[in-house]
Image (cartoon, coloured by chain):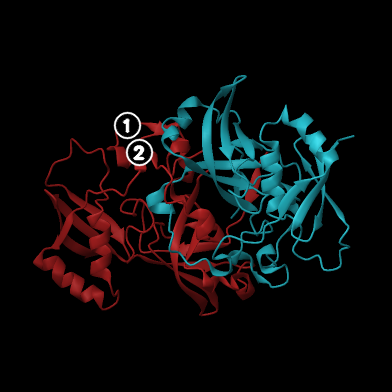
Chain colours: A cyan, B red
Amino acid sequence: MNLTFTPIGIIHSPFKEKFGVPRQPGIAPAARATLELLPPYDRDEALESLAGFSHVWLVFVFHATADQGWHPTVRPPRLGGNARVGVFASRSMFRPNPIGLSVVELAGFGREDGKLVLHLRGADLIDGTPVLDIKPYVPYVDSIPDARGGFAGSAPEARLEVCFTAEAEAQLAVREARHPRLRELIVQVLGADPRPAYREDEPVERIYGMRLLDFDLRWRVEGASAVVVELRTLA
Amino acid sequence: MNLTFTPIGIIHSPFKEKFGVPRQPGIAPAARATLELLPPYDRDEALESLAGFSHVWLVFVFHATADQGWHPTVRPPRLGGNARVGVFASRSMFRPNPIGLSVVELAGFGREDGKLVLHLRGADLIDGTPVLDIKPYVPYVDSIPDARGGFAGSAPEARLEVCFTAEAEAQLAVREARHPRLRELIVQVLGADPRPAYREDEPVERIYGMRLLDFDLRWRVEGASAVVVELRTLA
């Protein structure tokens, strides 16, 4: 049996590539994304009463990696990238059906330039992600605080202190005019240490780069600090 | 863009038709369902480390109603079946993409007669439901007890007292030999009052029927009581 679905909307997000995207929703509350509903699903009535809900589930497609197939086991970053767990015991994007599930905070919604748009906080989604469904978060059903969370039983603790070189600080000041809360966003994203877990052979002076908004964010890691070295304009 | 998925498994459940299925997971903890993984997804390794999680998300297809299309608004039973809310503010099965999401308690898993099977408690799924994905419930991410739940802000309160006529009691005793906890299951299912919300014109003496396991459960409602009148063997 094959089941065919069609996107109801598309995500616009500061995260332009897989590397650097927060590994769970809520890690970077300063990450403001929007969900643009696509015709014929962009009906105002379809969002009637949604304002009463503070959070929504997004059912989406891991489109950037959807053609990479799946394996019965994966190595979650949470376990240092070495131990294997079953794909169904993980939230890995490499799944038999590349469907993702994220709860995000709903900051508002409405018409903008004729488009019906939802504003989301804390999204962990790549720009361009196709969304299959929006469902209200119903706490009396969906919230199970006492559930046992296996190897992901608590939030990850390892966080990096984030600082900026003088040059990066100057570039940040310029960009913050257009992107308020940019410092906060960078601190949250790099603070969660987006580097791959498995990096034993990497030189310590390595410069990491990720595309964020309309620039390349470049940083290195020194001990427990992430040092932002450049916010480089894209060629 | 069309996206095609294939079921990784299928639900075996006591609920054989839409009417009577609990409206949210957890309403009938005595409802024991199984999820049978289908080839090529029935790999033991794919469930490695899942035992550490008490609950899982099931991403499934509302197959029984999948061909009935969608409307921008729906009338949730929660609001008495009269008020309309947007389809994306509801968990209705009549959605643009008929994808469902339920959190269920994982009671165990393993090989049975060569099949890889997960045992689930509190499932609100119809027998034969195709499942697209299993994801671990990660409480530090998924549990947001303070989320605002709109018109579904708290669990429904209206519950019926369930009693059995002498005839039904005798039929129950026979069937309980084969289905332990059957009384509990019936009390939980009927106690939640599965009748359609919109029933103003219905005669009070109406007998309701739903297919449960391998029989027809028949009851009537008197005031705040559901009176089970028969557990009728299917023809």
Asked if residue B17 can be seen in this view, the reply is yes
Disc 2 and disc 1: Cα gap in Å? 11 Å
* Residue at the far top in the pictured view: A113
Q: Position of residue A109 (x, y in %)?
A: 53, 29
Residue at the image point whose x is 27% and y is 43% from the top: B196
In the rendered structure, which amino acid carries the disc numbered 2? Phe
Q: Which residue is mark 1?
A: B83
Q: Are marks 2 and 1 in contact (CB under 8 Å)?
A: yes
Q: Which residue is mark 2?
A: B151
| Host chain of mark 1 | B
Marker count (numbered): 2
Dot 1: few (<14), some (14–19), or many (≥20) neighbours within 10 Å?
few
Dot 1 lies on which element? loop
Quadrant hosting residue A74: bottom right
> Which is more toward the observer, A101 or A179?
A179
Q: Quadrant of the N terminus of chain B?
A: top right
Q: Quadrant of the C terminus of chain B?
A: bottom left
Q: Position of residue B145 (x, y in %)?
A: 42, 51
